[in-house]
Image (tube, helix red, strand yellow):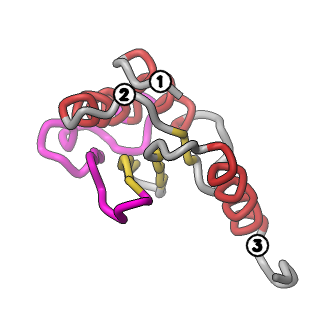
Amino acid sequence: MSTKGMSLFEKRRRRNRSALRARSGGRPRLSVHRSGKHIYAQVIDDAEGRTIASASTLEKDVRGTSGANIDAATAVGTRVAEAAKAAGVTQVVFDRGGFLFHGRVKALATAAREAGLEF
């Protein structure tokens, strides 16, 4: 498939997903999406095509603060890890999409690891 005309974001996203499929070993993936105002995370079981757990800055408990900072990303990472553990998932692969592993994405990943998810 040609990558001509694709944005750098789309190229990074495809490259990252391809590498994840190769090393996932059947584990669910922790997918992250970052927008200008919010950050979203979900644990997805690709074999069954369903979302196991999710968290975002749109939820009531986190909504009071800005969703576009590292503190909010840390809260979302902790919440998604707790929800995943409650659903029986302890090991995931981290899918950063086309986003660089820096700032809010890194804060979310670090918080999820500290809350008990392994990746």
What is the CA distance from the residue labelled 1 to the residue labelled 2? 6 Å
Quadrant assignment for the N terminus: bottom right
Give the amino acid type for the residue marked by disc 3 in the picture: Ser
Mark 2 or 3, nearer chain start? 3
Give the amino acid type for the residue marked by disc 1 in the picture: Glu
Query: x%, y% of residue 93?
Result: 53, 39
Position of residue 57 in the picture relative to residue 36 (left or right): left
Mark 1 or 2, nearer chain start? 2
Query: x%, y% of residue 79?
Result: 26, 32
Position of residue 1 in the picture relative to residue 59 (left or right): right
Mark 3 or 1, nearer chain start? 3
Name the foreground residue: 43 vs 73.
43
Give the residue at x 52% y 37%.
104
Asked if 48 appears above or below 30 in the picture, the reply is below
The span picked out in magenta is 46-72
Q: Which residue is mark 1?
A: 118
Q: Which residue is mark 3?
A: 7
Give the amino acid type for the residue marked by disc 2 in the picture: Thr
Secondary structure of residue under mark 1: loop
